[in-house]
Image (cartoon, rainbow, N blue to C red):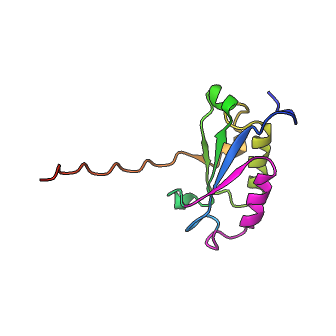
């Protein structure tokens, strides 16, 4: 289902920018330009560390309400470290993103499942 210019924004994008993502540790990309380019097609939220530093630069594409209703879930993309990868994300977002447009094969190479944080140990109950 193609997105028409009159349709609401198809999805949202969260971009990690903290200790590793968006820092000089990740070379070869203009981090500010990446956020600006993504922001041309969807609302972008800049997040503190998403705790997957080994995947820097991390982008999470979140489905629209229609995408979520169709079964779409947030898609985590890692190592988005060049202009071509950013353009691939932009093209998918423009097409509708999760639940609306299938994940392009090229972005499947960047997709990963974030590890779950360990639950805190239960308290000793005040003993």
Q: Quarter of the image containing the N terminus?
A: top right
Percent from the top left, x then y, of residue 106? 72, 45
Query: Which stretch is magenta?
Result: 23-48
- Position above or below: 68 against 48: above
Q: With 115 as the anchor, is 55 left or right in this view?
A: right
- Which residue is at the front of the view, 93 or 8? 8
Q: Is residue 54 left or right of residue 22?
A: left
Residue 24 in the image, given as x and y percentages of width and height: 64, 74
The verdict on residue 81 being magenta is no
Name the residue furthest left: 127
The residue at 79%/52% (across/down) is 87
Q: For this view, does 83 lie left or right of residue 23?
A: right
Query: Which residue is at a point 80% across and 47% down the rendered structure image?
Result: 41
Q: Is residue 2 left or right of residue 74?
A: right
Please provide percent x and percent y for residue 113: 53, 45
In the image shown, does 33 or 127 lie closer to the viewer? 127
Asked if the magenta segment contains residue 35, the reply would be yes
In the image, residue 88 lies at what x, y percent? 76, 48
The residue that appears at 86% across and 33% down in the rendered structure is 4
Residue in the image at 56% along x and 61% along y: 48
């Amino acid at each position: 289902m193609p997105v028409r210019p009159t349709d609401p924004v198809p999805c949202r994008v969260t971009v990690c920018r903290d200790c590793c993502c968006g820092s000089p540790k990740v070379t070869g990309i203009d981090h500010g330009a990446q956020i600006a380019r993504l922001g041309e097609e969807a609302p972008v939220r800049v997040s503190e560390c998403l705790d997957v530093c080994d995947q820097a630069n991390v982008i999470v594409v979140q489905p629209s309400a229609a995408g979520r209703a169709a079964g779409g879930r947030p898609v985590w993309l890692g190592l988005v470290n060049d202009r071509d990868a950013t353009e691939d994300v932009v093209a998918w977002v423009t097409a509708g993103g999760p639940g609306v447009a299938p994940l392009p094969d090229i972005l499947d190479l960047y997709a990963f499942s974030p590890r779950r944080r360990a639950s805190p140990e239960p308290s000793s109950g005040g003993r």
